[in-house]
Image (cartoon, rainbow, N blue to C red):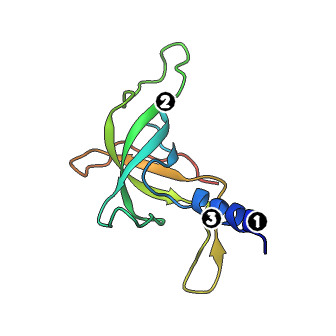
Amino acid sequence: MSFDVLVQVQLEVIEQMVISQSKLKIVDNSGGRWAKCIKVKGKSSESFAVVGDVVVVSVQSLRQRHKSQVRLRVNKSEVHLGVLVQTRKSYKQLDGRSISWGNNSIDLFHLSGICKVSSSEKVS
């Protein structure tokens, strides 16, 4: 295996893991679209997050508001807690099945730990 192919394979694996500075999609009705991971709570700085881990994120972009019908619950550059609900990196369940999604997604929470929104969007 040549060095270029080895580097490309390693980069693909790193892109699928959720570490600090990773771009995450917000999948709740808070009004945020994309967030950047600041820190994975409860783990060292070198480790990565898996489904169910709590991460500290900064909101990077917001969803468009159509005719002021949507009330935004977050603002740009705010810091929130979020739980990771989907990852591109596949993981094995106890029964042996492997699951992965198309992107890395989070559900937001208040810094106090109370749920930020009333319900999550349909996860497909």
Give the residue pinned by disc 1.
5
Q: Please tell me which residue is depicted at 26% across the width and 49% down the height of the picture.
A: 114
SS of the residue at dot 1? helix
Q: Quadrant of residue 88?
A: bottom right
Q: How crowded is mark 2: few (under 14 residues within 10 Å), some or many (20 or more)?
A: some
In the picture of the structure, the residue carrying the numbered disc 2 is: 61
Residue 122 in percent (x, y) is at 58, 49
Say which amino acid is labelled 1. Answer: Val
Looking at the image, residue 122 lies above or below residue 52:
above
Quarter of the image with the C terminus in it: bottom right
Considering only order in the chain, which callout, 1 or 3, is on the residue closer to the N terminus?
Answer: 1
Q: Earlier in the sequence, mark 2 or mark 1?
A: 1
Report the quarter where the N terminus lies.
Answer: bottom right
- Residue 87 is left or right of residue 42, and the answer is right
| Mark in front: 2 vs 1 | 1
Q: Which residue sits furthest right? A: 1
Q: Residues within 10 Å of mark 1 (few under 14, many from 20)?
A: few
Q: Where is residue 22 in the image (x, y as percent from the top left)?
A: 49, 49
Pick the residue in front: 38 or 29. 38
| Residue 42, above or below 124 | below
Seen in the image, is 124 located left or right of residue 84?
right
Badge 3 is on which residue? 13
Q: Is residue 76 left or right of residue 69?
A: left
Residue 5 horizontal/vertical position (percent): 76, 65
Instruction: Kindly identify the amino acid type of the residue bearing the numbered disc 3.
Output: Val
- Viewer-proximal residue, 45 or 57? 45
Q: Distance between the residues labelled 3 and 1?
A: 13 Å
Place of residue 36 in the rendered image (x, y in percent of width and height, measured from the top left):
45, 43
User: Is residue 31 at all visible to an observer of this figure?
Assistant: no
Mark 2 is on which residue type? Ser
